[in-house]
Image: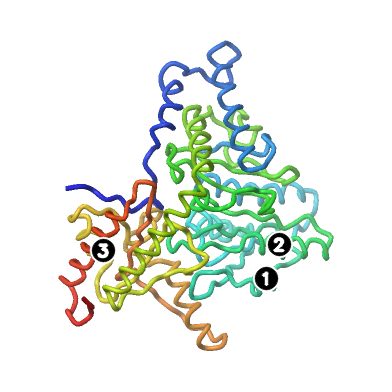
């Protein structure tokens, strides 16, 4: 039975050309980049070339590109590094004002849990901006949340569960206006762009962000490698200490093959982005139409317009999510019930809880209630370069069979 992989938001397969680029540094060119003899210099040259390639794609300076161990580490470095730098800068002040960080209710756990931990330690105050029923950040609420003590805003470029693309440029405009009227250097704007790199504009000059996270595992590159873009002038301190690699921001012997692979993967991604986005949008919209037409009580989560080209996130009431995933797996289809980045599979989705709250608020004129959402009947399909129309048809057929097995027949239309 042919396997159909539809969980590319969790991780992507390694591109063959990327593997070819990596192989010399997995076998023969094994030198430590910090060494000054030939093997080390060859490895260092490979890193510098990769940094140049990525900087060119991002429209950034080479020295604004830092290599780390993955997307989670990049997010942690952005948040913890900026907070540490703030305290270092104000170390001579007797009573330092506690810094304020703003994020959204639907961030990746690498963002949310890092901010919550800093709150727990009493190092920051934080505001979590709500989203509407489609997952778009409330810009009015965000604007009102900015304080004189705000040092960092972290809003993800595209959501890893529901695929909603956030208005990052608008966030930047609001921050710049705030900084202009208050004559301050803060807050910085950080975005986790791990899910966006394949499909969205990653020109940091156009986006205007100060820090940006992405990783190799989401762009058909290797796992265990990530990047943090840090704009010149941004005050940031390391969170890992050692030999002072990566401009003293991220110590540790560099993952040369991973760095080379990520640069190659990003180059391939940029070359095929325009055509692949068009292809996947067509497949995605066809997939959504087929599901909604054939399963009458299915609901699409996320914004239909501001949406990643490869994301289809649906809810089917009255069937457990894990049952759906396991049944589809037995039919040769790989998908997920929610983000694979959370190890606690028993907990509900904070993203869907935020959507439900946003839907309630839109209907009840600002009133707020406590909502508890369970991931019952939710499925995330994330298409990839290998996905075909035949794969979609087979998946819809399999899903229809699974849902009919566990639901009442009158829920369906022929």
Describe the element under mark 2 as helix, strand or loop.
strand
Left or right of 406 in this view: 61: right
Q: Quadrant of the C terminus?
A: bottom left
Numbered circle sitting on residue 150: 2
Q: Quadrant of residue 379?
A: bottom left
Q: Which of 225 and 89 is in front in this view?
A: 225
Left or right of 367 in this view: 21: left
- Measure the C-alpha gap from mark 3 to mark 1: 43 Å
Q: Nearer the viewer, residue 402 or 153?
A: 402
Image point (45%, 67%), residue name: 351
Describe the element under mark 1 as helix, strand or loop.
helix
- Measure the C-alpha gap from mark 3 to mark 2: 47 Å
Q: Residues within 10 Å of mark 1 (few under 14, many from 20)?
A: some
User: Mark 3 vs mark 1: which is more N-terminal?
Assistant: 1
Q: Identify residue for label 1.
A: 145
Numbered circle sitting on residue 41: none
Left or right of 244 in this view: 285: left
Residue 167: x %, y % from top left: 61, 63
Q: Where 33 sits versus 389, above or below?
A: above
Q: In which quarter of the image is residue 126?
A: bottom right
User: Disc 1 vs disc 2: Cβ atoms closer than 8 Å?
Assistant: yes
Left or right of 292 in this view: 250: right
Describe the element under mark 3 as helix, strand or loop.
helix
Most extreme residue toward the bottom, as rendered?
A: 364
Image point (69%, 37%), residue name: 61
Q: In which quarter of the image is residue 301?
A: bottom left
Residue 275: x %, y % from top left: 48, 49
Residue 105: x %, y % from top left: 52, 67
Q: Identify residue for label 3.
A: 396
Image point (50%, 36%), residue name: 262
């Amino acid at each position: 039975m042919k396997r159909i992989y539809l969980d590319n938001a969790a991780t992507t397969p390694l591109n063959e050309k990327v593997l070819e680029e990596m192989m010399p540094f997995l076998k023969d060119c094994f030198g430590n980049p910090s060494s000054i003899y030939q093997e080390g210099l060859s490895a260092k040259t490979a890193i510098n070339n990769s940094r140049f390639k990525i900087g060119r794609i991002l429209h950034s300076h080479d020295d604004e590109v830092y290599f780390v161990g993955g997307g989670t580490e990049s997010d942690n470095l952005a948040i913890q590094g900026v907070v540490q730098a703030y305290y270092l800068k104000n170390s001579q002040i007797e009573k330092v004002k506690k810094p304020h960080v703003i994020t959204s209710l639907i961030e990746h756990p690498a963002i949310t849990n890092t901010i919550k931990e800093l709150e727990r330690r009493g190092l920051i105050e934080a505001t979590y901006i709500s989203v509407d029923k489609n997952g778009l950040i409330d810009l009015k609420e965000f604007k009102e949340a900015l304080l004189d003590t705000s040092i960092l805003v972290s809003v993800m470029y595209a959501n890893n569960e529901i695929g909603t693309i956030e208005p990052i440029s608008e966030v930047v405009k609001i921050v710049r206006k705030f900084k202009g009227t208050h004559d301050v250097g803060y807050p910085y704007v950080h975005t986790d762009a791990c899910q966006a790199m394949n499909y969205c504009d990653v020109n940091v000059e156009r986006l205007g962000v100060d820090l940006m996270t992405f990783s190799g595992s989401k762009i058909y590159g290797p796992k265990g490698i990530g990047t943090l873009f840090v704009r010149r002038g941004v005050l940031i301190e390391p969170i890992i200490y050692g030999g002072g690699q990566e401009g003293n921001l991220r110590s540790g012997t560099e993952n040369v093959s991973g760095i080379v692979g990520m640069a190659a993967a990003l180059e391939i991604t940029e070359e095929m982005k325009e055509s692949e986005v068009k292809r996947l949008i067509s497949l995605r919209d066809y997939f959504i139409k087929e599901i909604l037409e054939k399963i009458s009580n299915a609901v699409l989560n996320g914004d239909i317009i501001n949406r990643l080209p490869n994301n289809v996130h649906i809810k089917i009431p009255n069937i457990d999510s894990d049952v759906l995933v396991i049944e589809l797996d037995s039919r040769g289809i790989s998908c997920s019930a929610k983000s694979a980045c959370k190890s606690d599979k028993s907990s509900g989705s904070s993203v869907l809880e935020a959507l439900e709250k946003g839907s309630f608020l839109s209907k009840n004129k600002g009133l707020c209630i406590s909502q508890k959402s369970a991931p019952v009947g939710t499925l995330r399909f994330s298409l990839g370069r290998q996905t075909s129309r035949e794969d979609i048809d087979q998946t819809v057929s399999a899903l229809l069979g699974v849902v009919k097995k566990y639901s009442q027949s009158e829920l369906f239309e022929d």
